Image (cartoon, helix red, strand yellow):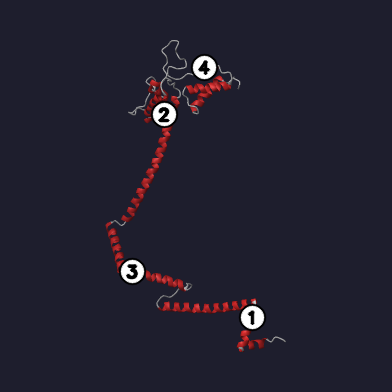
């Protein structure tokens, strides 16, 4: 039997029972179900859009009648939100307390302008900030000063330690006693010492007078000053006779034992002898002075020696 579209449409539209059977048959298939759902959704969207448009149109008309016309391109709910906020702010000004507060603030400002104190508020802010800045600056200056002080103390201590390493201290005096005397001398000499512009160190007395040699009028070296300050603990040269120690100079400086160093047969033996010699003279191992004296002695006595 040939399908007649016109007869099917007439039967579907005019016969409710037939229409129900056809829709039930369509809905029972997957494709038919999807088709009906999409059709229903499109129908609802078209209707709800029209309803929303009509609703917002009526709201816009009502607002316009009240004197609040919505600008073109602005959504209705955004316009309502901004309008309500504006009304809220205006309502706040209707509060007698708010008006009174605003009026008093204006009076105070006018009074400050007339008296020349309009910038008092900002001046107070500046002073508060200035105090904070000054505190921060003082802290940083203290750090810088501390750094320079530490550097100065270290430089002077190195000068005094280098000079001390050249002096022969008495082995008959306990180390604790020698430490007390040495620390006292170091403290007194370093207290007023100054590092000059050329990097040299000058030592001064408590009155600010530079310490100079009476013989040459040149400024005293750290070694000369320590010799005078540590007289009681420096090894004394015997007055004469067979008991004299030829390893000690008249100035308290420990002389190297030429006989011992010259008797070394190899460079290895000489290195050991040099280490013992420097240690016995109070030269601290690992210091620049230790390396300097060690190199000088090795150059003098070990040039022609075999390694082993």
Q: Are marks 2 and 4 in contact (CB under 8 Å)?
A: no
Which residue matches tag 2? 201
Q: Position of residue 141 (x, y in %)?
A: 39, 41
Work out which residue is located at the far right of the displayed protein and give it: 1
How crowded pointer 4 is (Cα within 10 Å; few <14, some 14-19, many 20+) is rated as few
- For this view, does 211 lie left or right of residue 293? left
Of marks 1 and 2, the one in the foreground: 1
Spatial CA distance of label 2 from label 4 is: 33 Å
Which residue matches tag 4? 258
Spatial CA distance of label 2 from label 3 is: 78 Å
- For this view, does 42 lie left or right of residue 63? right
How crowded pointer 1 is (Cα within 10 Å; few <14, some 14-19, many 20+) is rated as some
Q: Position of residue 247 (x, y in %)?
A: 47, 17
Res 219 visible: no
- For this view, does 243 lie left or right of residue 4? left
Which residue matches tag 1? 26
């Amino acid at each position: 039997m040939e399908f007649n579209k016109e007869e099917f449409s007439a039967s579907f539209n005019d016969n409710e029972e037939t229409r129900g059977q056809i829709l039930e048959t369509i809905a029972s298939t997957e494709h038919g179900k999807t088709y009906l759902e999409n059709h229903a959704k499109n129908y609802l969207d078209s209707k709800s859009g029209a309803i929303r448009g009509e609703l917002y149109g009526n709201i816009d008309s009502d607002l316009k009648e009240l004197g609040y016309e919505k600008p073109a391109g602005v959504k209705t709910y955004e316009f309502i939100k901004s309008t309500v906020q504006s009304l809220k702010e205006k309502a706040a000004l209707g509060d007698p307390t708010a008006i009174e507060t605003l009026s008093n603030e204006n009076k105070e400002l006018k009074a400050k302008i007339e008296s020349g104190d309009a910038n008092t508020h900002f001046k107070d802010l500046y002073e508060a900030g200035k105090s904070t800045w000054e505190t921060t600056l003082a802290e940083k200056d203290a750090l810088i000063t501390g750094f320079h002080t530490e550097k100065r103390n270290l430089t002077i201590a190195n000068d005094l330690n280098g000079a001390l390493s050249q002096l022969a201290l008495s082995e008959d005096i306990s180390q604790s006693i020698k430490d007390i005397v040495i620390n006292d001398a170091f403290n007194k000499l370093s207290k007023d010492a100054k590092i000059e512009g050329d990097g040299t160190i000058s030592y001064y007395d408590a009155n600010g007078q530079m310490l100079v040699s009476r013989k040459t009028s040149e400024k005293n070296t750290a070694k000369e000053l320590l010799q005078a300050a540590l007289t009681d603990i420096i090894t004394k040269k015997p007055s004469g006779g067979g008991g004299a120690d030829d390893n000690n100079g008249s100035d308290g400086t420990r002389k190297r034992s030429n006989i011992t160093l010259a008797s070394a047969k190899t460079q290895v033996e000489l290195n050991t002898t040099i280490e013992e010699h420097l240690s016995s003279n109070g030269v601290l191992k690992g210091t620049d002075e230790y390396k300097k004296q060690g190199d000088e002695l090795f150059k003098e006595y070990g040039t022609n020696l075999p390694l082993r």
